[in-house]
Amino acid sequence: AFVLWFQSRYPFPFDYWPAVRRNGLVRVLFLVAIMVAVLLAPSWAARRSGVAGQLAVLLLLVADVVTHVPDQNPRVEAARMAPGLWSQAVPLPPPRLGESRVMISPEAEARLLHSDVRDIETDFLGKRLALWSNLNLLEGLPKVNGSSTLQLREQAQVQALLYPGTNSFTNGLIQFLAVSHRTKPGTVVEWAPWTNAMPLVSCGQRPVFADATNTLAGLVSPDFDPTQIVFLPPDAQTIVQITNRTVARVVATRFAAHRVEVDVKAEEPSLVVVAQSFYHPWRAEVNGAPAPLLRANHAFQAVPVPAGEHCVVLSYRDQKFALGAVISAGTLGVCLIGCCLGRRRFVSALSGSPPEIAAGQVALQRLRSPAAEREPPSVRQP
């Protein structure tokens, strides 16, 4: 009742109230039926129909689960999920991890989100060609945005700059994000090359220290040139002593899921800027020694390096995840030990010592003896 009331008063953007109301009422009916079956179970057991009552409860539970979301998720043939569709249909070299990204235009994003194509397979194949939501993962293609249940706050704020609901592009920000493929103007599933993409790792920019509000405004400014400047938070001034653009270059980069390696050659102290999301489990090292990892351009990463040739390593180490895994493993171990000890006690009880068996037989015999043969209450010993 609370869920239905809350839904009617505060609906979410894509909720459909008639379906929610109908589903909620059906859930109420199942709940009532299950509770009635549970309450009647003792009387069924007294009538020697306890098994039928238990089966009725189980069948009601199964029916509740099966009918909960009967047609919410449409289905397509598994063959439609086969990778390689985009590469076969698009006559452009695809981007690769650590090199560049694709970006759906705001206009195409809106049309795909509210697609009115009736045929499920046609709609799905069109969205695959458009690399919509997380369908880019089937092709192994990196993308500017995607389908994320949980988003980093700063990353979502930068994404909001790219998708204001119009087809206007902030060219400097798109260049910084290494966009090499964009949706072709006026289309939804066709792609066009974007030639001024920066590499995902760059260096030598002049730092500009600004708070979050001014940084976001600077990212969409027509004067923003990501090859010349990088925005850093004000508290980074105590770490970064660089004041001008520097002479430095990236020699090589190696990207993996949880590790980025960058070989850089700098003629003077410089900043290495990485266009991937800043998040606290990332750790930076320069030539094997810990180094500060700074927030760059509001949502991304930067590492200061001294003059010379260096190997910068960014590694993702989530200590809380590791702690959770250790706790889960310990809990599993305790459960296994408990199961083993419980099994031993059960087996020991079945094969009890002769005195225990004798005592149990005496007690059972007394229970089975007729009431007339038992001692009257008046002469029983306490």
Image: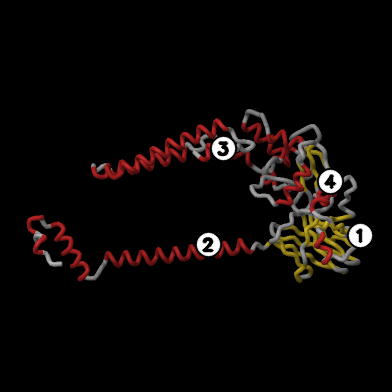
Between 129 and 229, the one lying in front of the other is 229
Sequence order check: which comes first, mark 3 or mark 4?
3
Query: Nearer the observer, disc 4 or disc 1?
Result: 4
* Three-letter code, disc 4: Val
Sequence-earlier tag: 1 or 2: 1
Q: Which residue is mark 3?
A: 7
Q: Quadrant of residue 324?
A: bottom right
| Closer to viewer: mark 4 or mark 2 | 4
Sequence order check, earlier mark of 1 and 3: 3
Say which residue appears at 79% left-offset and 65% top-offset.
Answer: 312
Camera-near label (3 vs 4) is 3
Residue denoted by label 1: 245
Work out whether 93 lies above or below 14.
below
Mark 2 falls on what kind of element?
A: helix
- Judged left or right of residue 23, residue 99 is right
- CA–CA distance in space, label 4 to label 2: 45 Å
In front of the other: 15 or 317 = 15
Dot 3: element: helix
Q: Counting residues from the N terminus, which is met first, the one under dot 2 or under dot 3?
A: 3
Q: CA distance from mark 1 to mark 3?
A: 54 Å
Q: CA distance from mark 1 to mark 2?
A: 49 Å
Chain-order first, disc 4 or disc 2 = 4
Q: Secondary structure at mark 4?
A: loop
Residue that numbered label 4 is attached to: 220
- The residue beneath circle 2 is 328
Sort mark 4 into few (<14), some (14-19) or many (20+) by Cα contacts within 10 Å.
Answer: some
Q: Is residue 34 left or right of residue 43?
A: right
What's under tag 1, amino acid-wise? Arg
How many marks the image carries: the answer is 4
